[in-house]
Image (cartoon, grey):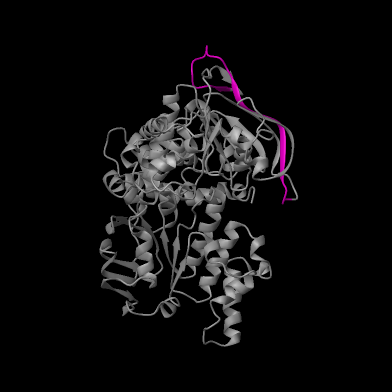
């Protein structure tokens, strides 16, 4: 049995119903309530840690429920998942007290392969879960372990693939699939045996917006198809994306404790999300800024259902009548002229021409595989274009060596661990200056300036292993800053980050931009693009198909569809307050962002430090 798959045969069960924990279950009120997951005073401490991660957890989840568990990074939500699926204590040993029951068994004493007959887990990284050379082989993995007869295996693989709409790719290699298709293969791999509980650990972490929406819709379709027999648990911090389809309950975890457990309407209205470092839905924030004290009776679980009183509607409608913001004039710092690039006769970048202006914060957006990262590599010199020119401040640098180009253009990878090679912070940040022909005094001055700017000077003698993920990200940025670049390119700077840490990283990057550095962000997080960028370059199939403000991009349904992005709930809210009349959704979104920036400073400053 391997850690990446936990499948098994389920039993015939009744659907859940009625009211439990103050939450009405999904099916009819006369149906039987049957707990399938029960924690009682459960505390757990990892063997390598000095303090418990979970504290006195009391939680009941009923058969047939669809539940979202949310919390900041390090809150304990993934630890709860690892108890449910049996990885604790078998894969992650430690000390625990209290009791837990999952599908009638105790996962802390039941062999892992037996727990896997009840709980199927889909992890957040699809690429790390594949074993087979083809989609069909990968789906069949658990059946091969159970020595299922060949004809039955084929039939069950075909059935599971059809459920998640991947049946036309059974002979494809997993690495040739899109991010969304990979997620579907992972789902089929746990559906191939009729598990009772489907556990999704951050299923949206590596997906572009359109693929993420499809993943949530697929999970919802699985739940509806099961008609009360399957319990679904989604662990995420991108709550608004999860709420694209209905859930029965939201469970909020912070510092190893269950701090809230209720219906989506109750949780969203209570402000408990922002109090514990989780972003509430954007349309709810807009209503609060418009002066409406959102209550559970307003049904705020979706932008389509939420009640908008007349006063708030009038205030919101006024936003759409504000003039659009005009960017200031600036000189181009980077110019790309008809860039083309391919590998093995496959065209990847197709005639890209664009300009980046001095002092901008620019987002390069688009679906996975659109060419965003490849374009960044061409800018940095890691790859050389087949045709076209790259100019920095008017100078042609197309053939300039990487080392020399790196003095002006820095590149920060998505995963800081892939950039770090030294043990201590000071060693790592000094590394980039080893072969620079500058005085020792200048080296030390640059190192100190970079560390102070990144908030790391006080920790300069610390081992990197003692740092948080966000702090390691800052180390990699400091390592780039010592070369005093004019431009810093960051690949998915907030991937996998909860709202509090996301805000911390982005506010830090904003301060770098304020110091004069031009920032280019490769991202499919359109919330990030809205809040922190001046402009978005939208890529699709190796081409730039739009260069507009991020608000204009997200107010254009045709453009978002073409780029596998999606409009946000702010666009839907703008349409609702327009009530059939013409509305300038771009102006509406711009005004929301301007007001949110001020509102966040005034109202949420004390909450953003919670749990750090």
Examine the rendering and report whether any part of residue 453 can be seen: yes
Q: Which residue is drawn at 38% across and 39% down?
A: 214
Residue positioned 43% across, 49% down in the render: 527
Residue 184: image x %, image y %?
41, 40
Image x and y of residue 10, in percent: 52, 26
Q: Is residue 303 visible?
A: no
Asked if residue 17 is positioned above or below residue 91 in the image, the reply reads: above
Q: What stretch is highlighted in magenta?
A: 23-49
- Drawn side of residue 447 relative to residue 373, left or right: right
With respect to residue 244, does 431 lie above or below? below
Single out the residue that lies furthest toward the top.
30
Q: Quadrant of the N terminus?
A: top right
Q: Which residue is drawn at 45% across and 33% down?
A: 192
Q: Is residue 430 above or below residue 473?
A: below
Q: Does the magenta-highlighted stretch encompass residue 48?
A: yes
Query: Residue 140 is drawn in which quadrant?
Result: top left
In front of the other: 322 or 102: 102
431 on left or right of 98:
left
The quadrant holding residue 18 is: top right
Front position in the image: 345 or 271 = 345
Taking the spot 43% from the left edge, 31% from the top edge, the residue there is: 220
Examine the structure image and report whether residue 140 is included in the region drawn in magenta: no
Q: Nearer the viewer, residue 494 or 193?
A: 193
Residue 50 location (% of width, % of height): 75, 50
């Amino acid at each position: 049995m391997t850690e990446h798959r936990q499948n098994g045969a389920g039993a015939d069960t009744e659907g859940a119903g009625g009211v439990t924990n103050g939450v009405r279950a999904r099916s009819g009120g006369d149906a039987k309530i049957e707990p399938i997951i029960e924690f009682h005073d459960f505390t757990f401490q990892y063997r390598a840690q000095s303090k418990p991660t979970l504290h006195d957890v009391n939680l009941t989840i009923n058969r047939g429920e669809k539940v979202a568990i949310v919390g900041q990074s390090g809150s304990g939500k993934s630890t709860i998942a690892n108890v449910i699926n049996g990885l604790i204590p078998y894969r992650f040993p430690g000390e625990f007290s209290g009791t837990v029951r999952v599908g009638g068994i105790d996962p802390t004493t039941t062999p892992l392969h037996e727990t896997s007959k009840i709980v199927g887990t889909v992890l957040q990284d699809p690429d790390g879960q594949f074993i087979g050379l083809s989609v069909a082989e990968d789906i069949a993995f658990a059946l091969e372990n159970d020595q299922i007869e060949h004809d039955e295996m084929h039939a069950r693989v075909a059935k599971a693939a059809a459920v998640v709409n991947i049946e036309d790719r059974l002979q494809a290699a997993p690495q040739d699939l899109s991010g969304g298709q990979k997620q579907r293969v992972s789902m089929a791999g746990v559906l191939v045996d009729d598990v009772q509980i489907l556990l999704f650990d951050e299923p949206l972490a590596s997906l572009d917006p359109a693929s993420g929406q499809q993943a949530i819709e697929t999970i919802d379709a699985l739940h509806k198809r099961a008609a009360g027999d399957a319990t679904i648990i989604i662990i995420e911090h991108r709550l608004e994306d999860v709420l694209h389809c209905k859930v029965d309950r939201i469970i909020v975890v912070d510092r190893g404790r269950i701090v809230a457990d209720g219906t989506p309407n109750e949780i969203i209205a209570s402000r408990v999300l922002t109090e514990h470092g989780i972003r509430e839905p954007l349309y709810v924030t807009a209503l609060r800024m418009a002066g409406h004290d959102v209550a559970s009776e307003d049904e705020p679980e979706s932008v389509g259902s939420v009640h908008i009183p007349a006063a708030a509607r009038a205030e919101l409608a006024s936003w759409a009548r504000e003039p659009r913001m005009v960017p200031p004039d600036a000189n181009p710092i980077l110019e790309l002229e008809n860039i083309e690039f391919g590998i093995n006769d496959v065209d990847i970048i197709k005639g890209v021409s664009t300009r980046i202006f001095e002092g901008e914060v620019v987002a390069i957006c688009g679906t996975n595989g659109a060419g965003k990262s490849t374009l960044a590599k061409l800018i940095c010199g890691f790859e050389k274009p087949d045709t076209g020119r790259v100019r920095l401040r008017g100078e042609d640098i197309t053939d300039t060596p990487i080392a020399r180009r790196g003095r002006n253009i820095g590149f920060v990878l998505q995963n800081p661990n892939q950039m770090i090679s030294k043990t201590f912070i000071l060693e790592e940040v000094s590394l980039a200056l080893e072969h620079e022909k500058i005085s020792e005094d200048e080296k030390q001055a640059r190192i100190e300036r970079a560390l102070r700017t990144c908030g790391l000077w006080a920790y300069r003698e610390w081992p990197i292993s003692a740092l948080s993920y966000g702090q390691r990200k800052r180390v990699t940025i400091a390592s780039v800053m010592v070369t005093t670049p004019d431009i810093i390119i960051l690949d998915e700077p907030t991937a996998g980050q909860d709202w509090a840490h996301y805000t911390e990283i982005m506010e830090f990057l904003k301060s770098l931009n304020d110091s004069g550095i031009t920032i280019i962000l490769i991202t499919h997080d359109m919330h990030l693009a809205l809040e922190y960028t001046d402009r978005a370059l939208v890529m699709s199939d190796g081409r730039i198909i739009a260069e507009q403000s991020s608000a204009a991009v997200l107010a254009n349904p045709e453009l978002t569809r073409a780029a596998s992005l999606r409009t946000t709930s702010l666009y839907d809210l703008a349409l609702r307050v327009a009530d059939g009349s013409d509305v300038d959704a771009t102006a509406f979104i711009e005004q929301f962002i301007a007001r949110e920036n001020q509102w966040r400073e005034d109202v949420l400053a004390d909450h953003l430090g919670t749990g750090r």
